[in-house]
Image (cartoon, coloured by chain):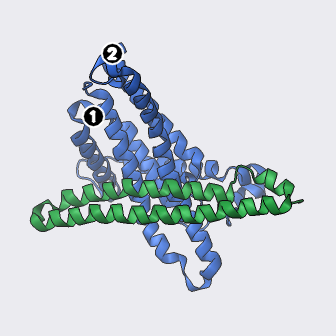
Chain colours: A green, B blue
């Protein structure tokens, strides 16, 4: 049983690592698209740069929050695993 | 996950309340933030003159800037909402920024603080909706046509619950992630001042997250005040 419990925990940590990597990938693309549109808007109309910048920052914070939800799930899996007590018990500690 | 060396927690240990202080550092540091904000507010309002001096000037710029921005989103009828959203912004910004001082822990790095702020804002949204529309506030949740109610009503309710989750987790995740990165970098390369660029980024993130919370609160209040589609 010890080997199964340990390999379960290893699988959880691996999943956490891949999860945050994929989330960061998606977040990078999303924020890049938003940033491209903002810079194009400023290039077309330099006077609107104040409003465009504020809107850009708000949009980037929204997109970033999706990546942060994935980060929170990854942190839960690594540090606050719901089955931590059961796993520790099975590992004989 | 062990907490790093926290100044006020050590202080509480000296008085003998060590167990309480170790379990609830976010409560202690939110008291510190409250004390700082009250002292600054008192000092700024003590000698209000027509031609403002430095301290009064800073607070006037801050408060009037926030008020004009919030009124520009909600319209003139939303001016009475400014005290709560202004307080939310200043409190969350102060909580976030205090984490950058060595030996201090940001209260918003704990889910308890952020969840409490998010719950206050979302429940206040519903209070505003009932106050402005009475029983017809339910029309906000029912959609445009009567035969789509079984689909739209659960979606709207879940959307409102998701607002609480998203507000609290966005702020918590940002601050907790920042603390974790600082802790890990300090452990890996603390002697080479490796955490310093992250702390510079942290100032920016602290202000942006407080502003995003403030802006979302205003938008939810505006949505509750306006007529349903």
Nearer the observer: mark 1 or 2; the answer is 2
Residue drawn at point x = 24 percent, y = 44 percent: B68
**Residue furthest top as drawn:** B135
Q: Quadrant of the C terminus of chain A?
A: bottom right
Q: Which residue is denoted by mark 2 in the rendering?
A: B136
Q: State how far apart marks 1 and 2 are (Cα).
A: 23 Å
In the displayed structure, would residue B42 be above or below residue B54? above
* Camera sees residue B95: no
Chain of the residue under label 2: B
Do the residues at discs 1 and 2 belong to one chain? Answer: yes
Residue drawn at point x = 19 percent, y = 56 percent: A51
Total marks in image: 2
* Camera sees residue A87: yes
> On the picture, is B89 further left or further right than A92?
left
Between discs 1 and 2, the one toward the N terminus: 1
Image x and y of residue B174, in percent: 49, 58
In the displayed structure, would residue B97 be above or below residue B59? below
Q: Quadrant of residue B217?
A: top left
Residue drawn at point x = 77 percent, y = 58 percent: B14
In the displayed structure, would residue B125 be above or below residue A63? above
**Residue furthest right as drawn:** A92
Which one is nearer the viewer's eye here, A33 or B138? A33
Which one is nearer the viewer's eye here, B94 or B137? B137
Residue drawn at point x = 27 percent, y = 25 percent: B228
Q: Which residue is denoted by mark 1 in the rendering?
A: B79
> On the picture, is B88 further left or further right than A87?
left
> On the picture, is A39 further left or further right than B35?
left
Q: Secondary structure at mark 1?
A: helix
Image x and y of residue A48, in percent: 14, 59
């Amino acid at each position: 049983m010890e080997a199964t419990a340990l390999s379960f925990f290893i699988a959880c940590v691996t999943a956490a690592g891949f999860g945050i990597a994929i989330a960061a990938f998606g977040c990078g693309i999303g924020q890049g698209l938003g940033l491209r549109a903002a810079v194009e808007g400023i290039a077309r109309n330099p006077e609107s740069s104040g409003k465009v910048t504020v809107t850009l920052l708000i949009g980037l914070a929204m997109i970033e929050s999706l990546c942060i939800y994935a980060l929170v799930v990854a942190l839960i899996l690594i540090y606050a695993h719901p089955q931590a007590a059961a796993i520790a018990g099975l590992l004989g500690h | 996950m062990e907490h790093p060396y926290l100044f006020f927690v050590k202080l509480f240990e000296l008085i003998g309340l060590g167990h309480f202080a170790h379990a609830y550092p976010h409560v202690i540091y939110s008291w510190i933030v409250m004390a700082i904000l009250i002292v600054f507010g008192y000092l700024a309002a003590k000698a209000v003159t027509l031609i403002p001096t430095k301290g009064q000037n800073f607070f006037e710029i801050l408060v009037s800037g926030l008020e004009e921005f919030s009124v520009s989103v909600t319209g003139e009828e939303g001016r009475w909402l400014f005290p709560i959203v202004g307080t939310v912004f200043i409190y969350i910004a102060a909580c976030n920024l205090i984490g950058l001082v060595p030996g201090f822990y940001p209260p918003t790095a704990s889910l308890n603080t952020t969840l409490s702020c998010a719950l206050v804002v979302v429940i206040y949204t519903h209070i505003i909706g009932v106050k402005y529309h009475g029983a017809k506030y339910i029309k906000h949740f029912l959609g445009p046509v009567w035969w789509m109610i079984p689909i739209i009503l659960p979606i709207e309710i879940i959307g409102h619950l998701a607002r609480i989750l998203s507000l609290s987790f966005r702020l918590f995740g940002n601050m907790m992630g920042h603390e974790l990165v600082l802790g890990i970098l300090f452990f890996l390369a603390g002697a080479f001042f490796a955490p310093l660029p992250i702390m510079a980024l942290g100032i920016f993130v602290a202000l942006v997250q407080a502003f995003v919370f403030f802006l979302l609160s205003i938008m939810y209040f505006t949505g509750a005040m306006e007529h349903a589609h």
